[in-house]
Image (tube, rainbow, N blue to C red):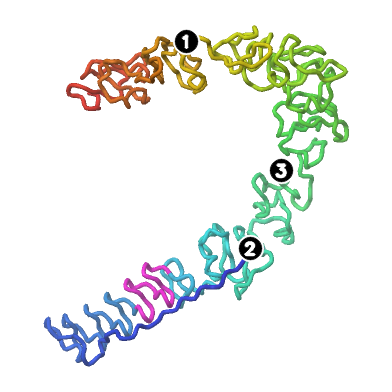
Amino acid sequence: MFKSVSPCVAVVLVAVAGCGSPTDEGGRYSGSGGGGDPAAGGDHNGSADPVSGSDHNGGADPVSGSDHNGGADPVSESDHNGAGDPVAGGDHDGAGDPAAGGDNDGGDAASNPVWRCSASYYGTDDGCDCGCGRIDPDCTDGCAAAGCGAAGCQYCYDANGAAIASCPPPPRPSGWTCGSGLWGDGACDCGCGVEDYECYLGSCTTPGCVSNVCDVCHDGPSVIACTPGGWLCSQAEFQDFSCDCGCGIVDPSCIGGCTTPGCRDDGCDLCHTTGGAIAVCAPVAYTCGEDAWQDYSCDCGCGVDDKGCYGGSCTTPGCLASSCDVCHDGASTNSCVPPAYTCGQAAWDDYYCDCGCGAADRGCATGGCTTPGCLANVCDVCHDGASTNSCMPATYTCGQAAWDDYYCDCGCGAVDHECLAGSCTTPGCVSDACEICHDGANTISCLPAAWSCPESYWVDLTCDCGCGAPDAYDCGTGGCATPGCTATGCNFCWGGANTGGCP
């Protein structure tokens, strides 16, 4: 497998001219602090000369071999904590530079090969790169040697960092009991003592085992069918996420189903006759055909209940029921619209509660109405015979926008259809159930007059107590109103000595 290659990134360390040197004749060493002259051998604490052998704490010379804590020279091999030089192999946290030769555990160039592949491939979440001199952090099971293979490798490279067309197989495990030529053969071999790396989830390892994900099944030296004994249909149909019936034994994909060739059951997706040939799954008494049986729609008038129907259907040819999607009268498919329904097929099929249509619309759960021009709170669309009208009651004074806004509008002369029990209709009224309150032409606050807490605490889904009036919308039957009170159900308590917390 190949992927696009970005140019390798080279890191170059450039010496900076003009820096002072401890060997300069004009160096700033004073020989004070009880130590010897640094030119002659002492540093600032009496230790040996940093030029001749010691640093400022008696350690080795940072030029010749040590840093300021006695570690190795940061120029020649180490950084300031004794780890490898970031140029030569170590960085400042003890981890090696992947471009130069350090590894991730404090190694350096002397003991770890360099990353041979593009620097843009190293630990960049671009897939597991193998054979690049060290293990890519993107790998969960990778390898480093040129041309190597491992189960987790997605891209593989040779000693020059060039991509290999396909990754070699990982080393064959010692527990592999099948032939050596079957390891890495491109097939999922099962029953071989250990899992074949070319198998996906659901394979098996015990000799003689079978699974639908296996390509080849082994029982010691013998190759066997990868289906259990007694299975009469093809291997591809065993446990293939469809319920195959009539195959001699139960398909693990079935919930229900049946096993005798030619059998039929509501749980079957495919039914097979002797020899595994596909047959009709619909019950013998089902008169609407296999396509109707398998189409997931509720077909009515088919002699027996269709498996796509869930209650409320009918079976007599020509019958109609609210749950029917397709209705059959024996010779043809008919509209499932009741003859008395006057609003047409589109209204019947639109999933809205259409009212005034002469017969109950199947989009209405309960509470609709059928007389042309009628109105009811559950109606989504209202019809008067010749046209579609607003379902808003004539006495509703807050306008169509308020009627359609999905809020409980109060004070509108008639109950808003979004309101539950407890709303009110008189202009200027307020109620716990109200979300928007109207006073004729104006929108007013729905807060009770006695409410003493901030307006934002009203209908905020937390029970506020001690606010002068019950927070009934949020507290339900719990809570309390007197400032300073506390009661079961209170989330916050206000007034008196209470500042939010409830005693």
Of the residues shown, which amino acid type is indicated by label 3?
Answer: Ser
Of the residues shown, which amino acid type is indicated by label 1?
Answer: Ala
Q: Residues within 10 Å of mark 1 (few under 14, many from 20)?
A: some
Q: Which residue is mark 3?
A: 211
Compare residues 337 and 223 and report the one nearer the observer: 337
Say what secondary structure mark 3 lies in.
loop
Tell me the quadrant of the picture where the N terminus can be found.
bottom right
Query: Is 87 one of the magenta-colored residues?
Result: yes
Q: Which quadrant of the view contains residue 351?
A: top right
Q: Which quadrant of the view contains residue 142?
A: bottom right
Camera-side mark, 2 or 1: 1
Say what secondary structure mark 2 lies in.
loop
Compare residues 325 and 135 and report the one nearer the observer: 325
User: Residue at 73% across / 39% down in the picture?
Assistant: 240
Q: Which residue is mark 1?
A: 414
The secondary structure making up most of the magenta span is loop
Tell me if residue 213 comes above or below residue 98 in the rendering: above
Name the spot of residue 145 as percent of width and height, x first.
Answer: 58, 70
Tell me the quadrant of the picture where the C terminus can be found.
top left
Query: Is 10 one of the magenta-colored residues?
Result: no
Q: Which residue is mark 2?
A: 171
Q: Which residues are magenta?
A: 74-95
Q: Is residue 228 left or right of residue 126?
A: right
Tell me if residue 229 comes above or below residue 122 in the rendering: above
